[in-house]
Amino acid sequence: MRTTRLIDESLFDSVDPPRLAGARCSRCGTVVFPRQASCPRCPAGLMSAHALPVRGRIWSWTLQAFPPKPPYRPPAGGYQPYHVGYVDLGEVLVEARLAVPRAEIWIGLPVRLTTLPAYHDEDGTEVLTFAFRPDGEAGR
């Protein structure tokens, strides 16, 4: 049986279906991801847990053509370039991997949250991270 775990459980509000865990300021309403203890916009706001929307649109993107700095771990087959971008979830921009082929990426593309393998631990456990894929249901 193959086992899996999340790359960082604090990033997720739920896993099945995936949902990211942000925070909202009780004073000014600012939403952040990942969660943090204090508001970046106002000095007195208390941050509370806030599940982020699962659908958004690509705001900007690029090709990650070189391996990221640690703690990144390359997969068993070695580093392979991948797309990364900012996804506009309406109340916050989230930087994420994009599970979208190059020919299909465009600014404004409707996307949906998903998970994908980041790497495997030494014991074979598949470590999952979050990403966004094209949302075939958008506009329906």
Image: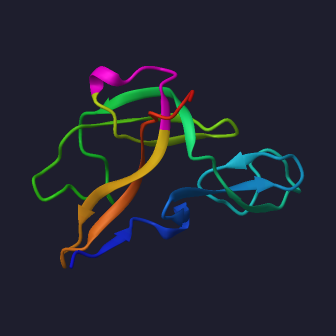
Residue drawn at x 28%, y 25% is 102
* Front position in the image: 120 or 40: 120
Quarter of the rendering occupied by the N terminus: bottom left
Position of 85 with respect to 50 (left or right) is: left
Residue 90 lies, in percent from the top left, at 67, 35
- The image's colouring method is rainbow
Residue 76 lies, in percent from the top left, at 12, 59
Residue 4 lies, in percent from the top left, at 31, 72
Position of 65 with respect to 135 (left or right) is: left
Position of 32 with respect to 61 (left or right) is: right
Residue 128 vertical placement versus 110 (above, below): below
Position of 47 with respect to 60 (left or right) is: right
* Front position in the image: 82 or 136: 136
- Quarter of the image for residue 51 reads bottom right
Q: Tell me which segment is drawn in magenta.
A: 102-111
Residue 16 vertical placement versus 89 (above, below): below
Is residue 104 a member of the stretch shown in magenta?
Answer: yes
Residue 81 lies, in percent from the top left, at 22, 38
Residue 106 vertical placement versus 84 (above, below): above
Is residue 94 a member of the stretch shown in magenta?
Answer: no
Residue drawn at x 77%, y 45% is 30
Quarter of the rendering occupied by the C terminus: top right
Residue drawn at x 85%, y 53% is 43
Residue drawn at x 28%, y 30% is 101
- Quarter of the image for residue 21 reads bottom right
Residue 17 vertical placement versus 52 (above, below): below
The single residue placed furthest to the front in the displayed view is 140
